[in-house]
Amino acid sequence: MILRFKQGILSLFSIIFAICFSIILLISLLYRLLIKSYQHIFSMSLSLVLFSTIVLLFFVAVYRIFSKLTRSGLRIVTICLSAAIGLMELAMIIFFHSILPPNIDGGHTYGEALYLLAHGHASGDVYFKIYPNNIPITVLRYWLYRLLSIVHISDYTIIDQTACAVVLNISIYFSWKLVLRLFDEKMANLYLLMAMTCFPLFLYITYFYTDTMALMFPAVLLYLWYLYHRSGKIRFLVLLGLFLGIGYEIRPNVILFLPALVIYMLFVLKPKKVLINLIVVAVMMAGACYSVQAYNRHLGYIPDPSLAMPSAHWIMIGLSRYGEYTSADFNLTFQQPTRQAKIKADLNQIKARMARKNVSGLLYLWVMKIGGTWGMGAKEYDFYTRISANPTTAYQYLFGHQNRLILYVIQIFYVVTIFLLIFSVMNYLRTKRIRLNLLIQICLFGNFLFYTFLWEAEPRYSLLFTPFMLLGAVFGFDELLLRIHKMANSRAGKISKGRLIELSLSGVLLAGVIVCAWINLPGYTQNRTVQKQYIVDQEATAGLQSAFVDTHHTIRQTFRATGPFTHVSMNIRDRQGKGIYNFSVTDLSNHRRLFSENFTSAQAKPQHNLIFSTVKTRQSKTEDQITVRQVSGTGNARLDLSLYGNGYDRGSIYSGGYFMENGSVIKNAVLKFQVYSIQKKPYLSTESYYLLFLLPVLMLIFYVYTTPRDKKRKVKSICS
């Protein structure tokens, strides 16, 4: 009776899981809506289905090739795929080490880590009293800098990105090890291929923060549970509790693994054993958390309940218009004098918003939050990589203003992952056997519920459990293979007919690729649009956010001119009175003035960029200087220019120059300005466009090449 009850619950859970993630799949296909573009929604969704199907068939073809290899051949493939992953990470670090920490979250932890390195104790920055959850990642960052300074490594960006790559490799390794134990070398290699094509994992290497540093914990925790459940050795459970505690301190939502594990244990262990395991995990986790917090206090991080944001704050944010952070919500909570007042204000807002939204409003909000947290395969990595000291063309196409192509490619592979994740429920529905896949599904479902119905919505929140999504996709791929093999075996003596079906499918998909390429050819290769080639793209503001220009203040900003430029812009924060100002650019190598133009305060619109067409360009690399001074005006005439001048010591955000006021260099300050040349050209060259479309064609050819030809061959599933 109990067994039948458990089977009924798990069957129902599998169906609910499939429904929820089918909603995610549908939202993911509505890509145009997610990027807030309402044009060509149907054609974009159709193209996503087209290319996702081709990628899925490509994975099937690759597995067929793996099935023909010997064990030594499979090991060579493992080495090659691992080397390719390493090269991708190395390329990210080498070519994009100029990406700097943003002026939020990761930027605060960076500045505080530098302060700790210089002074050995906390700075007292109120940010860490408001958000104490960011203290452990700051201390970790400080220790990385401190240890590597012993061997005279002081390039902090390289340290950050290398640490992110190491953590990612740990995640990939333990996931690969798990797939190898649960399946075989063929499926383990396929997992490596799936991980390699999950591009956000690699693009997020450029952002050191809690999400990227906690990325290894899901795979490690799952692997430790697997070892414990298989061997019964308590040391694995002890390690699981320690890692869970450390992971919780670095990234609190790691704790969502614990209730998922408890629910899973109730289905595979006796209640008494579940209780004992939970006590062991809780004790080890508490010990790890206490040790981390004690050391934080030793450094001077003393909690202040009157400033710290309560949990109700993020629940309240989750009920905002799109379930996203707003400064108004922050101010509402922050302005309350005590913790009790903060909680009361947040609870009142929660009740008011739920009553105001009613059922239809809440349904709309939940759909928006699903799209915000789960719908975008890119996890909004580009939001945290907007500051680069060297915004090259490659940077623009991967992280900057021209990255719409890579975002679309990422979405294709993400759709495949979600589809396979949905397909993974077939394992239990078919076998009624509980496998590790169930724990993965419970954890993902818990995250789905938590971020949809309770917490703030944020795309990067789903990054942490991306390893679980990839592992679940492996189970789904195994089920897909089983269906394909059953269809092949059911057509005994009719393999030729089956091959004809596969050839027909490939032909339809090939025709779709050709039509898609033909339709989009003018838009991508012929329509000439204005594109900016940036030398400097400094858009950040923080801390002291303005520089004054009046009769007593002249400001200067130097920059490294790494190539020709035609335009220079600066951001106007505010203005008062009536004045005439002069903007000039000087070549510091020979003190030759390249450009000079007067402008009035009427032309300087607040919160807008003031753009100057310099006309003159040079090929040589030089150091240039921007000067802004007042020529004439009324007594109260003043111009406020937007400035990055942070209150925390994180160094200069733009390393290619320095900011001066009346001839004096201002430390850790830089003008909000851009230097670029404008070119009118297509988004892609014709050659690049055809090469891109050649890839799905080659995938289809590869799939056709691997289709079974032998009528007598019997194919056996690897599923157990």
Image (cartoon, rainbow, N blue to C red):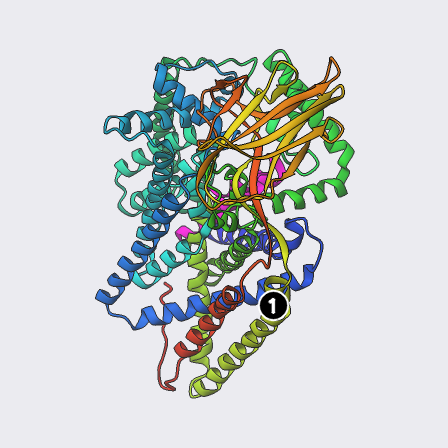
The answer to which of 113 and 180 lies nearer the viewer is 113
Residue 348 position, x and y percent, is 71, 23
Q: Is residue 292 above or below residue 318?
A: above
Q: Is residue 468 above or below residue 40?
A: above
Q: Is residue 78 above or below residue 486?
A: above
Q: Is residue 504 above or below residue 692?
A: below
Residue 213 position, x and y percent, is 40, 36
Residue 624 visible in rendering: yes
The answer to which of 415 and 549 lies nearer the viewer is 549
Kindly identify which residue carries mark 1: 521
Which residue lies at the image location 58% right of the left edge and 62% below the top edge? 48
- Residue 261, picture quadrant: top left
Residue 339 position, x and y percent, is 59, 15
The answer to which of 467 and 184 lies nearer the viewer is 467
Residue 615 relative to residue 490: left or right = right
Q: Is residue 276 magenta?
A: no
Residue 503 position, x and y percent, is 49, 81
Q: Which residues are magenta?
A: 435-464
Quadrant (top left, top right, bottom left, bottom right) of the C terminus = bottom left
Label 1, secondary structure: give it. Answer: helix
- Main SS, magenta residues: helix
- Give the farthest residue toward the top: 337
Residue 216 relative to residue 660: left or right = left
Q: Is residue 444 magenta?
A: yes
- Residue 316, picture quadrant: top right
Residue 439 visible in rendering: no
Which residue lies at the image location 50% right of the left edge and 67% below the top edge? 687
Amino acid type, mark 1: Leu
> Count the marks: how many?
1
The answer to which of 698 and 28 lies nearer the viewer is 698
**Crowd rating for badge 1 (residues with CA inside 10 Å; few <14, some 14–19, many 20+):** some
